């Protein structure tokens, strides 16, 4: 059953009258494409009011995405009549999708709607269309978002997707006026210029978003990224933040985004570089296990285009990164590291003194060997799933026979005890893969970890892996270790 229906242009809406009510009943999201001129000359409204559309309804749709386009100069002969047509269209949309709570308004045009007679009319249309909604997204496909006076739009949004571009001075009040009710805010930025205005009201007082629980800052590719130099010593804008996702370099000069949300922040994704490391160290942001409910951490890599613009070394030294892990990881259960240098620092920092007792899932873009996995498991006793590249069995185990490997893993020094480890997903397996080495590593880990059963592989790799395991089983005299190999075999019907 279709969950999304796209109708474009709006004149083709009659195409869906032949789909059948059962499809429309299960549709959750409706995309409509309409000419801006037709909104105000009445064509769009009259089309939806015509008898052939009487039965076109989306009774369970929760989102309407209205794509407004205009590629010729707009003419308004009678503004009052044009407004009546626009209001009629909005009311008809509410009848077509009575349960809609979210409105996405996407504007595409070669003509910028400015503070003109038409601009004022367009603002009223946005207010009427988005007013009843709990979530409104305003964006543009080709040019900066049209000038919209926030006071004319809506007052109590809970969710907002906001494009930060060179017109932010005109549109940032839209964010401020909804600060008290926003629960989710996504900023798609075309530039960093002026991003500090997010945290400062028109009267220069600190902006506070008292119940915002999700903040996403998403860049537009290949845009310049200028970090704000303004400090916010007394500001704590997001005291209830639970989800913080920064998909670019950290845009502020201090730890302003991390204040007073120590007891609420559960998910953190960021690019960790020298600038951010200095901020964290200076403010002691994560010291003393302050973020006790932080469960998910995603450390992104700094893009090469950004590294090239930074100093020679964009990453902090290993000792600083090791301290970062000690500070941030005590309560974390899920850790993903895209940055090779950060992942290498984590592996290098592992020792008996560094124990991360809660990590259940570790995903790193780095090649590690079986010996390093053993060290990881000692520092992460609850780790159940590891995702990484494979770099062999390790120098420590390379020249040992199977009997010596068994003896080594059974010794007090290497014994893993009650390890929860059960799965190692290896990236980058290809034609040059040494399946004998992987099978030996799997056997080594299975001897030390009673729950370890699987290294997931692509279907075309299973036969070579199983064959290598069969060779190991043929060398075993003990039924116990033959059974250990048996549990590692992957079914050909996977």
Image (cartoon, rainbow, N blue to C red):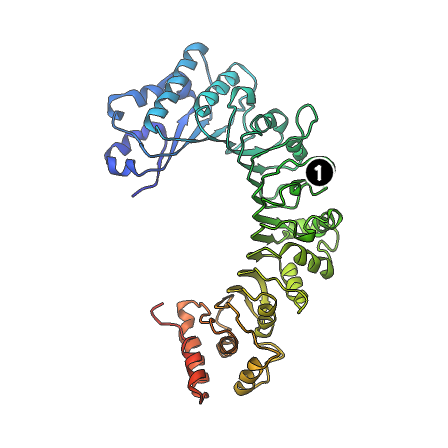
- Residue at the bottom extreme, as displayed: 477
Q: Is residue 415 above or below residue 271?
A: below
Q: Is residue 120 above or below residue 168?
A: above
Res 364 visible: yes
Residue at the (54%, 73%) spot, across then down? 417
Label 1 SS: loop
Q: Is residue 335 above or below residue 95?
A: below
Quarter residue 150 falls in:
top right
* Relative vertical location of residue 263 with respect to residue 35 in this rendering, above or below: below
Rendered location of residue 11, percent (x, y): 33, 27
Q: At 64% from the left edge and 54% from the top edge, which residue is drawn?
A: 328
Residue 78 appears in view: no
Disc tally is 1
Q: Position of residue 329 (x, y in %)?
A: 62, 56
Between 186 and 211, the residue placed more toward the observer is: 211
The answer to which of 107 and 480 lies nearer the viewer is 480
Percent from the top left, x then y, of residue 349?
A: 68, 65
Q: Quadrant of the C terminus?
A: bottom left
- Pinpoint residue 456: horizontal percent, then vertical percent: 44, 67
Q: Which residue is mark 1?
A: 228
Quarter of the image for residue 31 reads top left
Tell me if 352 is positioned left or right of 445 in this view.
Answer: right
| Mark 1, other Cα within 10 Å: few <14 / some 14–19 / many ≥20 | some
């Amino acid at each position: 059953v279709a969950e999304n229906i796209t109708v474009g242009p709006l004149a083709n809406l009659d195409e869906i009258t032949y789909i059948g009510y059962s499809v429309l009943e299960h549709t959750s999201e409706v995309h409509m494409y309409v000419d801006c001129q037709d909104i105000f000359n009445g064509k769009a409204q009259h089309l939806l009011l015509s008898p052939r559309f009487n039965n076109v309804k989306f009774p369970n749709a929760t989102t309407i995405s209205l794509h407004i386009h205009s590629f010729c100069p707009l003419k308004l002969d009678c503004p009052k009549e044009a407004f009546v047509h626009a209001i009629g269209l909005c009311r008809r949309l509410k009848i077509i999708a009575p349960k809609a709570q979210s409105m996405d308004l996407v504007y595409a045009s070669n003509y910028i709607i400015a503070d003109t007679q038409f601009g004022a009319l367009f603002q009223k249309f946005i207010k009427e269309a988005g007013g009843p909604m709990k979530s409104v997204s305003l964006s543009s496909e080709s040019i900066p978002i049209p000038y919209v006076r926030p006071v004319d739009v809506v007052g109590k949004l809970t969710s907002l997707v906001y494009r930060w571009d060179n017109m932010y001075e005109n549109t940032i009040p839209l964010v401020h006026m909804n600060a008290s009710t926003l629960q989710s805010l996504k900023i798609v930025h075309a530039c960093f210029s002026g991003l500090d205005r997010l945290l400062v009201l028109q009267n220069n007082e600190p902006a506070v978003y008292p119940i915002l629980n999700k903040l996403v800052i998403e860049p537009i590719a290949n845009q310049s990224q200028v970090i704000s130099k303004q400090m916010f010593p007394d500001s704590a804008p997001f005291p209830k933040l639970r989800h913080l996702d920064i998909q670019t370099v950290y845009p502020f000069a201090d730890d302003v985004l991390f204040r007073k949300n120590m007891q609420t922040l559960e998910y953190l994704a960021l690019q960790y570089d020298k600038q951010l490391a200095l901020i964290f160290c200076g403010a002691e942001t994560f010291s003393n296990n302050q973020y006790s409910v932080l469960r998910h951490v995603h450390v992104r890599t700094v893009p090469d285009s950004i590294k090239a613009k930074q100093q020679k070394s964009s990453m902090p030294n290993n000792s600083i990164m090791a301290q970062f892990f000690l500070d941030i990881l005590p309560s974390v259960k899920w850790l993903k590291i895209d940055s090779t240098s950060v992942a290498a620092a984590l592996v290098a920092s592992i020792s008996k003194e560094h124990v991360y007792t809660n990590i259940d899932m570790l995903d790193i873009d780095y090649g590690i060997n079986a010996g390093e996995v053993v060290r990881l498991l000692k520092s992460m006793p609850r780790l159940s799933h590891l995702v990484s590249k494979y770099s062999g069995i390790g120098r420590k185990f390379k020249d040992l026979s199977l009997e010596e490997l068994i003896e080594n893993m059974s010794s007090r020094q290497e014994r893993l005890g009650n390890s929860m480890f059960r799965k190692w997903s290896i990236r980058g397996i290809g034609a040059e893969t040494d399946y004998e080495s992987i099978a030996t590593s799997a056997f080594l880990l299975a001897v030390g970890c009673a729950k370890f059963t699987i290294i997931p592989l692509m279907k075309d790799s299973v036969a070579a892996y199983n064959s290598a395991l069969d060779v190991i089983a043929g060398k075993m005299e003990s039924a116990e270790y033959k059974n250990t190999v048996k549990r590692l075999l992957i079914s050909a019907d996977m």
